[in-house]
Structure formats: structure tokens, C-alpha cells
Image (cartoon, rainbow, N blue to C red):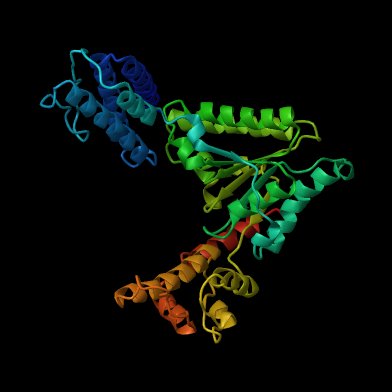
Amino acid sequence: MSLAPQELENSASKYAAEAIRLDSQGSRGMAIQSYQRAIEALVKLVQIYPDYKLNKVYMERANAYQNRIKALQMSHGLEDDRPAPIESKAEPVNGNGKGSAPASHKSANVETLKADFDDLVMKDKPKVSWDEVIGLDDAKRAIRESIVYPMKRPDLFPLGWPRGILLYGPPGCGKTLLAAAAAAEIDGYFINVDAASMMSKWLGEAEKNISKLFTMARKLNESEGVPVLLFIDEIDSLLGQRNSEVGGEVRVKNQFLTEMDGINGKSKESQLYVIGATNKPWSLEAGFLRRFQKRIYVTLPDGASRTNLFNQYTRPLNTEGSLKIEELAKIADGYSASDIKDICQSVQLRVVNELFESGKAMEANANPRPVSTTDFREILKVRKPSVSVDMIRAYMRWSDQFKAL
């Protein structure tokens, strides 16, 4: 592969970092030039790989830099000396470097461009019970075997236990909730990371963030002596197969591989887990699958689960006594848990909208009419499942090959 994309990545990274540093110091003219050079490198990268997956991210970042250039120029009275559109090859923009904007305005803009690592990570001790995870009995059992039981009785596991778990299946079926419930039961930290956001820290930053992420998880586990669940959503963004990879993606994968091998090779007493979630398991490279000893299919809710979900989401609503939850559960076959919540919310909006359109919403003690089975039927006519039959078949085929409960 040509080194040009890697060189452009590195150039853009260098110029962007330099621009932000100069911007924060008030050196506006020099900052403008560095921002513009970063934009040029990004545009060239997009032109070399027009179908590349991260092009959207690159262009968003380039637009952010261009907006910052405009803000700097306007604060200098240079409104007419604007950069060329990003779609074309832009020439460097020169400024005189004099004057300074208010400190608060400058800080806000610069901080927006930094996209700090802390913004990508949510660390918490969740308060989620297993009762909130409706259905998914196989998935619950597999996670308890891997995480909960070893925490309570590590002496029963002389061969150790899995530390890498992959949750895969249709969107909106409870993968995040499963991981959070496991963390809550063992009173552990739940570190939630969106891999797509992590990858948007492009240009040499993504692999650094992977290292920071695992270092933070290890420190929490070792210093506080509590279990840590590192939950990485959309993990295919990190570990997916690519037809053509820019150098940064290769480095990210290698860094992740090194970190996972480090966790799996640690003492059998370690209580640090990595739970990856994906809606597209078939896009994962086969070499990474063995790092996830448990591969759990998080399925669409079955009939009993759909009944429980409808009961849960209609409980706060004013419903007719004749509302037939079991009938709704049958009609909603093929809908995800998230779909069912959206359906109940749509029914709520339906009756509230009627109240406002009647002109009585602001009257004292005015409330929507009771929700009926007919309301649900009408919504279901126009709201189709978010998961297609073809997608379910694809999950089943992949499960036949790679599932590991």
C-alpha cells in the first residue's frame, strides 16, 4: 500500500495539533495557516480514497477547522479574506496575528476542536437490576457464568474464566443493558465507550485513546480493588474488515490486540472484563474473535418478553381496561425491545396530540383519553420493525459458525 495516506494522516495530525496550540496562545495568523494546511491534507486524503469509511469524519473535522478559520478572520476584520470551499483545493490563508478575541470565546472554540478523551468515555457504577433486562435468558446465564459467579466464588474456577465477551445481534435488543446489569450485580465500574466516536479521534489519536482506555480500566481495577467492565459499543468500527486501510486503522487494531492479549494473559484473579457489542458481527476480522471467548447472540424478544415489555411501557399510561397486551405482543412479532418502547411512546403522543388539537389541553384537570388496543393497531400499521427478516437470517448464519455461549 502506498505510504501517501499515512503521510497525509500524519501531516494533518501535526498541523491540527499545531493550530490548536497556536490558537490557544492567541497567535491567530499562524493558527489560521496551520488549520488550512490540516484541511488540505484531509481533502487530499478523501480524494485518494473517495469510498473510505472515515471520509465523513475527516470532512466534519475539516469543516470544523474551516469554521474556526472564519471565526478568527471575523474577529480580525478579515471577513473578505475567507478560505476556499473545502470541496476545492484551498490555498493557505494568511492573517496578521494581531489582537485577540475574548478569552472565554477563544477557549470554547479551541476546546470544541480538541474533543478530549474524557468526552468519549462514560465511567459509572450503574444501578440496573436483572429484572430490568426482560427475556434474554441465554445471554443472562452466559454473562453470569463469566462475570458474576467468578466474582463471588473465584476458588471454583481453577482454570480461570473468560474476560472477553462479544454481544451481537439486532440493534435495540438490550446489549448495553445486559452489560450494565452485570456491573451492577458485582458492584463494579462500568466504562461505556462508543467505538465509532473513538475512531473519530483520527490521525494518530485513536490508538493512543485505546491505550488510555485500558490503562484507566486497569488502574481502577487495581487501585480500588473492584471489578471493571469495559463496554465497547459498535466494536466493528475498531475491528472490522476493510478493503483498504489507512495506516491509523492498522495501528488501532494492533493496539487493541495487544491490550486484549494483556488482559487474557493476566493473573486468573483479575477482574477486568472487555465486553464488545456489535450489530454487524460478520464484519469483524476472524483473528479477533478468539479474544472474545464468549460470543453471545442477543436476540429479538420472544412472545413472553414482548408481553412483559408492553406491560412495562404501558404501566405509566392511562389505558382502557379492555387493552389486550397479549394480543399486542402477537402483532409485534419481529419487533425489537426498542421498537416496542417507540410504539408505546407513539401511542402516547397520539392521544396527547388529540387533546391539544381539541383546544382543551390548557384547561384545569384536562387529561388525554385512555389508550386502547385500536390505538396500538393504528400505530403498528404505519410503524414497521427496524430489523428485517434478511438481517435475522444473517445473524443466524453467523451464529451457526461462531456462537460461543
Tell me where residue 346 appears, x and y as whole percent. Answer: 42, 70
Q: Position of residue 192 (x, y in %)?
A: 57, 42
Q: Is residue 75 above or below residue 330?
A: above
Q: Compared with residue 35, is residue 126 higher up or lower down, i.e. above or below?
A: below
Q: Residue at x 26, y 26 (%)?
A: 40
Q: Say if 240 sits above or below 400 in the image.
A: above
Q: Quadrant of the N terminus?
A: top left
| 23 horizontally vs 290: left or right | left
Q: Is residue 292 above or below residue 351?
A: above
- What is the number of callouts on the image? 0
Residue 179: x %, y % from top left:
65, 50
Q: Position of residue 277 (x, y in %)?
A: 58, 49
Image position of 105 (left or right of 282): left
Quadrant for the C terminus, please: bottom right
In this image, 193 relative to 75: left or right? right
Q: Quadrant of residue 94?
A: top left
Tell me if 186 is positioned left or right of 260 in this view. Answer: right
* Residue situated in front as seen by the camera: 268 or 29: 29
Nearest to the observer: residue 203 or residue 34: 34
Residue 274, located in which quarter of the rendered image? top right
Q: Residue furthest bottom?
A: 322
Q: Residue lying farthest left? A: 80
Of residues 331 and 313, the one nearer the viewer is: 313
Q: Give the residue displayed 70% in from the left and 45% down from the top.
A: 293
